[in-house]
Image (cartoon, grey):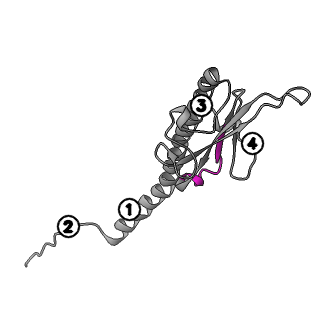
C-alpha cells in the first residue's frame, strides 16, 4: 500500500484576495483624496489673506507720507497685481480699487481703498472662499463663488 501525500503550496494570492485588496484600497482613496485636496485649498487661503493684509498695511504706510492712497503697485514696493501678476504661488490675483475723498457729501466721504484677492487656477475649486477683501477701515470680508458672504468661515 502506497501512501501518497499531497502538500498544498501557497505561492501567492488568490484572485479573490487580490480583488478584496483592490476594493479596500479604492474605498480608502475615494475618502482620502478629496479630503486631502480640501485641506490643500484651505492652506492656500492663508496666502491670500496674508497678501491682502500686507497690501493694506502698505497702503496705510503710503497714506501716512503722501496723504492719499495709490493705485500703483510700484509706489507700494509691491511686485504688482491684476491678471498679469498672480501672487505667491499663483493661486490668487490681487486687485486694488482706490476711491477719492468727497468733502461735498454730507457727511464727507473720506478717501479709501479696497484690496481684493480672487482665486484663480485650481484654487477656483475652493467655492467656499472665492475672494478675500480688506478696506481702509480694516474690515475683512470674503465671498463664496455664488457671491454670498462667507467671512465667518474664511477669515477664521
Disc 4 and disc 2 in contact, CB within 8 angstroms: no
Identify the disc placed on residue 136.
Answer: none
Q: Which residues are magenta?
A: 123-133
Q: Residue furthest bottom?
A: 1
Residue 40 location, x and y as percent?
50, 46
Report the mark closest to the observer, 3 or 2. 3
Q: Earlier in the sequence, mark 3 or mark 2?
A: 2
Residue 5, by quadrant, is: bottom left
Q: Residue furthest top?
A: 64
Name the residue beneath numbered marker 3.
Answer: 53
Q: Secondary structure at mark 1?
A: helix
Name the residue beneath numbered marker 1.
Answer: 21
Disc 4 and disc 1 in contact, CB within 8 angstroms: no
Give the vertical position of 148 relative to 15 (above or below).
above
- For disc 2, the neighbor class at 10 Å (few under 14, some 14 to 19, many from 20) is few
Q: Is residue 113 left or right of residue 17?
A: right
State the residue in front, 86 or 105. Answer: 105
State the residue in front, 156 or 88. Answer: 88
Name the residue beneath numbered marker 4.
Answer: 149
Q: Secondary structure at mark 4?
A: loop
The Cα atoms of the two marked residues, 3 and 2, are separated by 63 Å
Residue 133 location, x and y as percent?
67, 38
Report the mark closest to the observer, 4 or 2. 4
Q: Earlier in the sequence, mark 3 or mark 4?
A: 3
Amino acid at each position: 500500500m502506497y501512501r501518497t501525500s499531497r502538500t498544498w503550496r501557497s505561492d501567492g494570492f488568490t484572485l479573490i484576495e487580490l480583488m478584496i485588496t483592490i476594493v479596500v484600497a479604492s474605498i480608502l482613496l475615494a475618502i482620502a483624496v478629496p479630503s486631502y485636496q480640501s485641506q490643500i485649498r484651505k492652506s492656500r487661503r492663508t496666502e491670500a489673506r496674508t497678501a491682502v493684509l500686507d497690501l493694506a498695511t502698505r497702503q496705510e504706510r503710503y497714506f501716512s507720507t503722501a496723504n492719499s492712497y495709490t493705485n500703483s503697485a510700484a509706489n507700494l514696493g509691491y511686485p504688482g497685481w491684476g491678471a498679469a501678476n498672480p501672487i505667491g504661488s499663483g493661486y490668487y490675483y490681487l486687485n486694488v480699487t482706490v476711491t477719492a475723498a468727497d468733502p461735498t457729501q454730507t457727511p464727507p466721504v473720506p478717501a479709501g481703498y479696497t484690496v481684493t484677492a480672487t482665486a484663480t487656477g485650481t484654487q477656483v475649486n475652493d467655492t467656499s472662499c472665492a475672494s478675500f477683501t480688506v478696506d481702509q477701515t480694516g474690515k475683512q470680508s470674503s465671498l463664496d463663488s455664488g457671491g454670498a458672504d462667507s467671512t465667518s468661515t474664511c477669515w477664521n
